[in-house]
Amino acid sequence: MSLYARILRYLRPHAGIFGVSVAGMVVYAALDTFSFTLLIPFLYVLFGMQGGAAGGAFGAGGPTGGGAMHRLLDWAVGDLVTGAPPMAALRNVVLLLFAVFMVKNVALYVEQYTISMTEGLVMRDMRRQIYARLLQLGFPFFQRTRTGQIISRVTVDIEQMRSLVTRNLAQFASNLLQAVFFFAAMLLISWKMTLVAVLCVPLMLVLWQGFRHRLRRGVLKALNAGGEVSSHLQETVSGIRLVKASGAEAWENRRFAALTQGQYKAQLRNDRWRQFFGPATEMITASAILGLLWYGSSLVLRDHALGAGEFLTLLVLAGKLMAPVKWLGNFGATVQPGLAAAERAFELLDAPVEVYDQPGARPAPTFRDALRFEDVTFRYSDGEPVLRNVSLEVRPGKMVALVGPSGAGKSTLADLIPRFHDPTAGRITLDGVALGELKLGDLRGLLGIVTQETILFHDTVRANIAYGREGVPQERVEAAARAANAHGFIAEMPEGYDTVLGEKGVRLSGGQRQRIAIARALLRNPPILILDEATSALDNESERLVQMAIDELVHDRTVVVIAHRLSTVRRADLILVMEGGRIVQRGSHDELLAEGGLYRRLYDMQFTEPPPSAPGAGGSAGSAEASEDADLILAAGPVPAAD
């Protein structure tokens, strides 16, 4: 119930609209019950029945003879039938029934329409909250959670909760109100028969308690299996080029078939118990109705304690009562899919935010002094450290490069600068202030990042260049594109800067996508720049154009570069060689070549010809492709330019 109570909190902002729905439920339930009790005067007038001792329009009867109901009907409709000819009395009752049905259905419309309004508003609020939470979560969450599972929870699971939050709750309230009104009307007619009719309720409660936990577990397994199907589908679509290039269509078909078979079995096991609940409650209610028939007949024929009109009306009310009672008994099974979906959705809302603004965080308006790593160690979860006691200093106007084989910890070190992760030990400072003490938005506002895997959205060229910035003039967008050598191919597009690029920029080549990303960074004009292997996946011509754009981008700013080609680090003031998460060599390009060691080995791996002269003369322009095992991070730092 604590989970359901948490879900119902989303109704609070819309309590007014939901209150109108409840008012409609009350009116509908009251008039629905009243319409059936009008059978008593109708039958009396039609067949000339008497309900007991004389008195009132329908007879006063004793406590077991419908006396209380008779008095209520005398007050409500006595003037319409008392003293009137039979046909006139029947006409009056029929007209009253028409009015009751009219008002009842207007109330039903109001109830259902306001429920739909509330449902839509609640779902909107929940999706907004979960999406906002996803944006708050750090990279560790996304690294340990499959994309398909996240999408499934935000879409499928939230939709599964849709009826639970409002419609199921409204149905619960409506059925409860109907049950109360029907039960009250039956009590007014005969408390003995009413007692027989409600004997099924405890049995339904016992049945529900026995199946509640089993149903929840079954639904969770089915939802998790559905999430795996979504994850596999997302991965296949994203990697469709590899699938087709590898001729792996049949293999992927078999994998998908196995996942969907698992989902089918999980759903079938869950439905086996859920579908049993309906027939079981049906048998309980049927037994109650049969008992009511037998006992009620004895009251009419043998004890003469109940009139025929009251007995028929009570049977009708009992039949009507069983429907909401059955629904209420089945409520536990009905809400289990929604509760299980809510449990999965709340896992996102409850996921810890590993990187956040600390209380009293300071602004970070610019970068003036130095960026320092002070004995920094970092590990993912409980694994081995990826960085071990790393210390370095980058000052404005200086270029520092980090070189090492794959797995040396270079990309992880770069990720610590924008606080994609926080160090496990040690600290990183900007102008003497620990990064954790700076406002996260301000810190990342000082950074521009261009990665090997260029991120473009299904939007226009202009929107992709000006991403995250509103109201940027067209001339500034074009100026950034020109500086990035991108204006030429953009102008040749069908709609120029208004051309939609497609998902992930599918309409562009790799070099064009990279230049769009560089234009985006130029528009931001950050004082610190991170280039993550920005040219490693390009052909020679694209690399040349992108390198020209990078030369413009790195001018007069602090830069962090991750690249495969060691030829790009020869301009560095200081090169730090990393291996196993540690810095194992320091020096300039010439000094490290003379020293030998790991840097020299990495350098020799990338050139088919030996260095042309003494160490430090640099490599030729015709260097070979970089080795798969040679990566580079390059950090440089001139004075930041004002935006």
Image: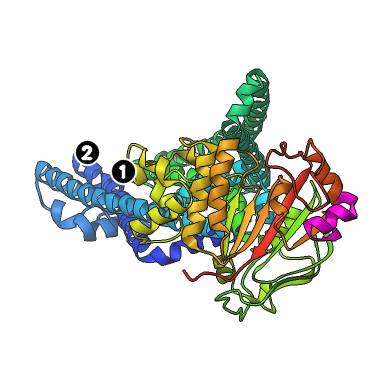
Q: Earlier in the sequence, mark 1 or mark 2?
A: 2
Label 2, secondary structure: give it.
helix
- Amino acid type at image mark 2: Phe
Residue 474 x %, y %: 34, 56
Left or right for 627, reference 63: right
Magenta highlight range: 579-598
**Residue 47 disc label:** 2
**Is 16 in front, or is 300?**
16
Residue underneath mark 1: 309
> Can residue 158 be seen?
no
- Amino acid type at image mark 1: Gly
> Of all residues shown, which one is farthest toward the front?
613
Residue 603 x %, y %: 80, 45
Indicate whether residue 582 is drawn in magenta: yes
Crowdedness near tag 2: few (<14), some (14–19) or many (≥20) residues, C-alpha within 10 Å = few
Crowdedness near tag 1: few (<14), some (14–19) or many (≥20) residues, C-alpha within 10 Å = many
Quadrant of res 13: bottom left
